[in-house]
Amino acid sequence: EVQLLESGGGLVQPGGSLRLSCAASGFTFSTYGMSWVRQAPGKGLEWVSGISDSGGNTYYADSVKGRFTISRDNSKNTLYLQMNSLRVEDTAMYYCAKESVGSWEINWFDPWGQGTLVTVSS
Amino acid sequence: QSVLTQPPSVSGAPGQRVTISCTGSSSNIGAGYDVHWYRQLPGTAPKLLIFGNKNRPSGVPDRFSGSKSGTSASLAITGLQAEDEADYYCQSYDSSLSVPVVFGGGTRLTVL
């Protein structure tokens, strides 16, 4: 069974940093692109960042570019999201998701992890 | 404001058929890019419901169907059940944006 388990969320002050992790199992992690998608309280889904299977290509939403860094360790089957200079508006549930095999034009996400909550507040 | 427009809410009685629309433009759905649908039950993570406009992952009942025409896509749910009460999101690609993934704003389905 394919499983994704996020960790690392918590309460942080504005300007602070957090590192999220997503442990993957049940599939050949190194052959799939991965993404982070967030959901602010009571709001819809927002794609945040994606990374290719090898880690050689990374992609970011404009709202986090320059502040967040996505990475992966294929030897540990783990995806990361380093979040710096956090803002109140970054408060959200952060989900990691496995991308389908294909280009962005046809990509879908399945499955999703259970999410980890990031709260940015003073 | 989402690039893909969904109605904020729809409702239906048990056993009825409901549809949820996802309206885009010539740079996303209208350009031929695939539409995917997700269901998010209260307090849980989103789950893939339809991929590639009309395909159901294994385990998704055939009560759920997807279609696409022009600049819009639709999710239809027949034989509505109480457990279908959830939020539904469409997702696609937009060639005019710097981000490779766009979601609709979501639709809350209420089973009356």
Image (cartoon, rainbow, N blue to C red):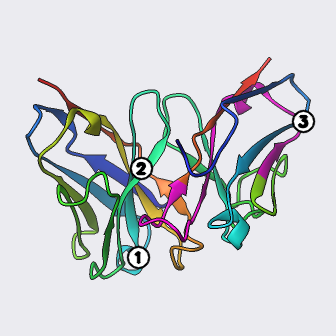
Return the chain for callout 3. B
Question: Residue A21: x percent and y percent?
Answer: 23, 54
Q: Residues within 10 Å of mark 3 (few under 14, many from 20)?
A: some
Q: Nearer the viewer, residue B76 or B72?
A: B72
Give the vertical position of B81 relative to A110 (above or below). Answer: above
> Which residue has dot 2 on it?
A113
Left or right for A16, reference A65: left
x 30%, y 79%: residue: A57
Disc 3 designates what residue?
B17
Q: In the image, which is nearer the foreground, mark 1 or mark 2?
A: 2
What stretch of residues is rendered in magenta? B74-102
Q: Nearer the viewer, residue B12 or B84?
A: B12
B12 on left or right of B22: right
Q: Are marks 3 and 2 on the same chain?
A: no
- The residue to which callout 1 is attached is A28
Q: Are marks 3 and 2 in contact (CB under 8 Å)?
A: no
Residue plotted at (90% across, 36% down)? B17
Secondary element at image label 3:
loop
Q: In the image, is residue A95 above or below residue A101?
A: above
Counting from the top left corner in percent of width and height, residue A13 is at: 10, 31
Residue B84 lies in magenta, yes or no? yes
Q: Chain of mark 1?
A: A
Residue B57 or residue A67, whichever sits in front: A67
- Residue B51 visible? The answer is no
Give the Cα distance between marks 3 and 1: 39 Å
Classify A41 as above or below A94: above
Find numbered disc 2 in the image and state the secondary structure of the residue it sits on: loop
Q: Amino acid at mark 1?
A: Thr
The residue positioned 84% from the left and 32% from the top of the image is B80
- Point out residue B32 in the picture as x, y percentages from the top left corner: 71, 72
- Which quadrant is home to the C terminus of chain A? top left
